[in-house]
Amino acid sequence: MNLTRRNALRNAALAGGILTAGAAGLAPWRPALAAKPKLDIGILGFSLAIHVPAITALHQGFPAEGYPEPSLTRITSMRVVTQTIAAGASNLGESDAISALRAAESGADIKLVGLPYANTSQVYVANAAKIKSLEDFAKGAVVAVNSKGDFTHLLLLGPLAKHDIDASKLTVIEIGGSGGRVAALRAGRVDAVPVHLDQAQQLMAAEPGKFNIVIRPWNEFENWISEAWIVPSSFLGNPDNERALVDVLKAQIASFRKANADLGYFAEGYRNYATISNAKEASDDSLREIWQSLSKEARAWPEDGGFRRKDFEAMMPIWKRTGAIKGSVDLDKVLATQYVEQALQELGA
Amino acid sequence: MRLRGASAGIWPALSILAGLLLWQLVSLGFSDFILPPPTAVLQRLGDPAYLAELGAALAASLGTMLAGFAIAFAVAVPLGTVMGRSPRLAAAVEPVLTAFYAIPPVALVPFVVIWFGLFVEGRIALIVLMSLPDILVVTLAGARDIPPRLIAVGRSFGASPAQMLRRVLLPASLPFLFAAMRVGLARAITGMITAELFLAAAALGGMMKTSAEAFDNAGVFVIVVLVCLLGLAVQSGVRRLERRMLHWHMEENR
Amino acid sequence: MRRDMLPWNLLGIVVALGAWEIGGRMLGDGLLAPPSSVLAAFPALLRDGMAEALGTAMLQMLVGYACALLVGIPLGVLMGRSRMADRLLHPWLSMLLVTSTAALVPLFILIFGTGMAFCGALVFMASAFYIMLTAYQGARGIDRRLMAVARSFGATRMQAFRMVLLPGLFPYLVTGARVGLVHAIRAMVMAQMFVMVGFGGLIAQSGFDASTAGLLALLVTIMLVSLALNRALDATGHRLAPWYRASKAGH
């Protein structure tokens, strides 16, 4: 269990004047020999194809190193995952890199330590009757995103800016919850929404010809950054924790390499851990197309972990221009690349 | 009378003050990323530009809430009154109503989007869906409670069904109507904020979402507290109205 | 609900199902799956472990609900019988009644994590104040003269409570318990939707399905559970206090 959340609750009790005596004695009881800590990890509500290698590593590769099975908690909102890390309520969190940087700008003491995947599998699905290509967005359209300025919103603004397409006639609305967004697209209430590639395929199979994919971000950008692993800075103070983090990243990068080399490994992970209807019945063959897109085209599971400072530097102007972050964040303080580097060193090329 | 009213007003105020103090103490144990202290929330209200934005959002939210509540009330009260007098109709509607009542409003959102869209119509629809069942249940209980003697008297004077409803049934269920109004308004306020958060973000819910995305927890709590105060204002407003109307109602019956 | 009304109960259900079937056929499975498609979706859901998920969810719900009853009823009765308690507690009741549990989910996750404590707290928050409100209305409505008569015949405070207050209060307590239960069930499912576990997790996942049949099947399941639990509470009410039926029949 996380010591920090207990801390917070304990302090609350203290403040209320309830547990004053008992709480003071808690700290010295902490066991000193917990060499292989049990990690408390917050992950996003949906685990889709692109998440599969990382999630498989947390379930298989990491415990195989002698660690207790980590406790994985799903939270549908990326912002809330970031908040739990900022508050020190879990050890490791999968979150939106931009929201993490924004939290750091508003004073959260957190560090980005790696990527659960590189690039993205989010695509823009549009109503085929209205939007067939990027250029059609110039004529005006209603687009639903989770929140303005998040990375799904930027996935639209970025390509439009790159191709000099006028975005002034776009109406962007915020709908919290993917169910509401998809329902809105289906009912013709909005013209385009961002969804993961596997969800897009499912939508398009449901009503053939009604929808099409208009933006595949990996065709537009070299190294798009969407999600990152974040930790509370306090977590890194302890050498046991740092060791555990390196082992998590090692297991994950090894899993990336296996998934790239072996469709079967990916497909098995998908059947076990993907949170999408009928994932359990998916055959290797039915997954070949999405595996091809993610592994080969989007290079979502880079053999070197894909966590590079220069990619963040390249993204900063886009993030700043769209107002996603203020730009006051100091990458030196927030990015901690040494854990991925150490993992790579130990793994060997 | 006036004096007593004033002294009665002190205790609720003291109670709220004590609650704020407790909140301030508890918040010491939490990071500001989780629970900001009430002082931080109050501080936000010092900015006039923010206050203006808040006022506009509150007005927009209130408009939608009242529209939704009015529709729900206008449908549920006559329906509930008729159901209360017709056991068969009640028996037919009740199981369906109870079943529908069990659906979490957030799960209704996709259907509201499909049928009513994402904007004002959708928000009003969600508010109606969330408050109508509660109003109906209370009105129904009230209509069942009307003494048969009253109805017999109405009949014997040859009242038409419309006259019965207006002259006998409605006045007799007035106390229940206020209960229905209280519960219905509480649900309508909940529905308002739910709709603004989960359909296209708007008004108070939209401000709450924007603050949350910027990790501005004090901003989130401004809205939470404002909605609580709205609840308090509406409930005591209805209470006051009830006292006045019921007073008048008793005088007239005397 | 009385037995001789059963045909009318059924009629209402049949009419509703019929309207839904027609509407569903017109709109198609993608927008509103008709009951016939929904029925066909059940086997796949049962295979995905819906029944177990439901059982666990309801057990967790009962914990939060029980706490809500234990807190809501005494406080409500106290408010109804004591003017001072009413003054101190009423503002809180009015304020907390309108808090949207959906809006509080992020805060509750941060404070309570995502496990049992989170679900329990959310269920408590959603149901306790409705229970309290009903108990309050019941307790306030009991005739003061009756209590005075009981006391003047030498009844102790406890006896007066048992013989006068409780019988009059009982229908309200059962009503409060029933209203609270519905709120509790809804809050439980919603809590799970946000942390993608159990039954609510299945609902959240079904948003991407080609057909709304799966989603509607899950919602129908929740409706049936709610109806059954409601009936069970009603029956418990009758068993515990025969006068409960009498006071209802008097209407």
Image (tube, rainbow, N blue to C red):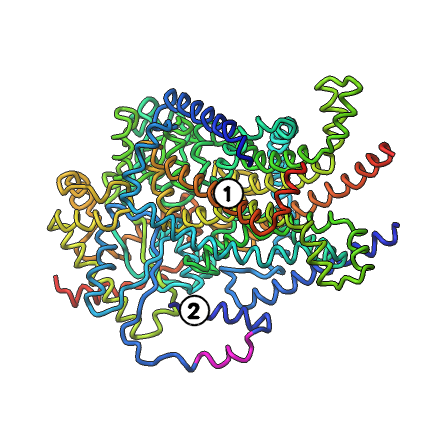
Question: In which chain is the residue bearing label 1?
Answer: C
Judged by depth in the image, the label closer to the viewer, 1 or 2, is 1
Marks 2 and 1: in contact by CB < 8 Å?
Answer: no
> Above or below — where is B37 with respect to C1?
below
Question: In which chain is the residue bearing label 2?
Answer: A
Quadrant in the picture for residue A214: top left
Q: In the drawing, does residue A183 fall left or right of residue C159?
A: left
The residue nearer to you, when weighing B133 against C111, is B133
> Above or below — where is C8 with respect to B206?
above
By secondary structure, the bulk of the magenta-drawn segment is best described as helix
The residue nearer to you, when weighing B29 against B167, is B167
Where, quadrant-wise, is the N terminus of chain C in this rendering?
A: top right
Q: Are marks 1 and 2 on the same chain?
A: no
Callout 1, which amino acid? Arg
Q: Residue at label 2? A: A4
Is residue A74 something one can see in this rendering? yes
The residue nearer to you, when weighing A140 against B92, is B92
Residue A323, horizontal then vertical, whole percent: 43, 45
Q: Specify the label residue C231 is tagged with.
A: 1
Residue B126, horizontal then vertical, whole percent: 52, 34
Is residue A333 something one can see in this rendering? no
Callout 2, which amino acid? Thr
Crowding around mark 1 (Cα neighbors within 10 Å: few <14, some 14 to 19, many 20+) is: some
Where, quadrant-wise, is the C terminus of chain C in this rendering?
A: top right
- Mark 1–mark 2 Cα distance, whole angstroms, equals 44 Å
Q: In the drawing, does residue A23 fall left or right of residue B14?
A: left
Residue B90, horizontal then vertical, whole percent: 58, 30
Q: Which residues fall within the magenta stretch?
A: A19-27
